[in-house]
């Protein structure tokens, strides 16, 4: 059985992850609106990963006899100054999420919840990858600058991103 304190903190994290989904989907929409279809594709896959993250917490709470309580999702921005600005903001956002995951890890260690700790270790490792991906994009976009042919080449490369192997939802039908 999951402790109330941890259930509450995990429900808050579901909100953070769904906000991340919303933010990246909004960035994808902005890319689509300026016809950078490769960048839009990359961000849609990123958004998909965020919903998968939210569902990992959702499933964990329910599997341990807790209750999922979904809260209101804040509205993300809808416009950015530049591609670089999108990726710099995303990197800062991932830094915030890493902070949330670290705080959750501190909590479950304090509460001696080993099952939750195992779940969170996955997120600790995932955040290293998330920050590295966005940091790489910030560096690349700084190199590309305002050189449109290079930007279009990068757009093509972004369109190659493959979705992760994990479905959003465990429907129950697969059990
Ligand atoms: Fe769910 Fe991008 O962290």
Image: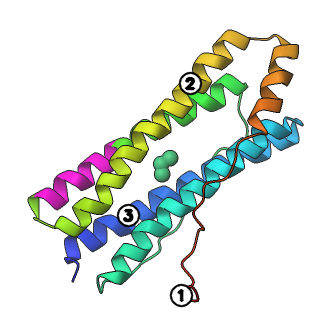
- Residue drawn at 57 percent across, 74 percent down: 169
Q: Position of residue 102 (x, y in %)?
A: 27, 46
Residue beneath disc 2: 136
Secondary structure found at label 2: helix
Judge: label 3 CB < 8 Å from ligand 1: no
Task: From the viewer's perspective, tell me whether residue 88 is left or right of residue 42.
Answer: left
Residue beneath disc 3: 12
Please determine whether, in this image, residue 52 is positioned above or below residue 27. Answer: below
- Residue drawn at 59 percent across, 68 percent down: 168
Residue beneath disc 1: 172
Q: Quadrant of residue 57?
A: bottom left
**Of labels 1 and 3, the one closer to you:** 1
Q: Please indicate, yes or no, whether residue 97 appears anywhere in the rendered image.
A: no
Task: From the viewer's perspective, tell me whether residue 7 is left or right of residue 145.
Answer: left
Colour basis: rainbow
- Residue drawn at 38 percent across, 64 percent down: 12
Q: CA distance from mark 2 to mark 1?
A: 37 Å
**Mark 1 near mark 3, Cβ–Cβ under 8 Å?**
no
The residue carrying pointer 3 sits among few (fewer than 14), some (14 to 19) or many (20 or more) residues within 10 Å by Cα, namely: some
Q: Quadrant of the N terminus?
A: bottom left
**Of labels 2 and 3, the one closer to you:** 2
Q: Is residue 121 magenta?
A: no
Secondary structure found at label 1: loop
Q: Is residue 100 magenta?
A: yes
What's drawn in magenta, residue-wise? 99-109
The residue carrying pointer 2 sits among few (fewer than 14), some (14 to 19) or many (20 or more) residues within 10 Å by Cα, namely: few
Q: CA distance from mark 1 to mark 3?
A: 24 Å
**Mark 2 near mark 1, Cβ–Cβ under 8 Å?**
no
């Amino acid at each position: 059985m999951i402790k109330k304190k941890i259930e509450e903190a995990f429900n808050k994290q579901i909100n953070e992850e769904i906000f991340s989904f919303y933010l990246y989907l909004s960035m994808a929409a902005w890319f689509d609106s300026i016809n950078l279809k490769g960048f839009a594709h990359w961000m849609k896959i990123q958004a998909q990963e965020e919903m998968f993250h939210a569902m990992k917490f959702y499933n964990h709470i329910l599997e341990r006899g807790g209750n999922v309580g979904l809260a209101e999702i804040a509205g993300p921005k809808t416009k950015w100054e530049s591609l670089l600005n999108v990726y710099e903001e995303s990197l800062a956002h991932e830094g915030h999420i890493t902070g949330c995951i670290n705080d959750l890890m501190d909590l479950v260690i304090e509460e001696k919840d080993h099952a939750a700790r195992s779940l969170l270790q996955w997120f600790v490792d995932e955040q290293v990858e998330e920050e590295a991906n966005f940091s790489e994009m910030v560096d690349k976009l700084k190199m590309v600058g305002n050189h449109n042919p290079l930007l279009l080449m990068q757009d093509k490369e972004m369109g190659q991103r493959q979705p992760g192997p994990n479905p959003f939802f465990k429907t129950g039908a697969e059990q």
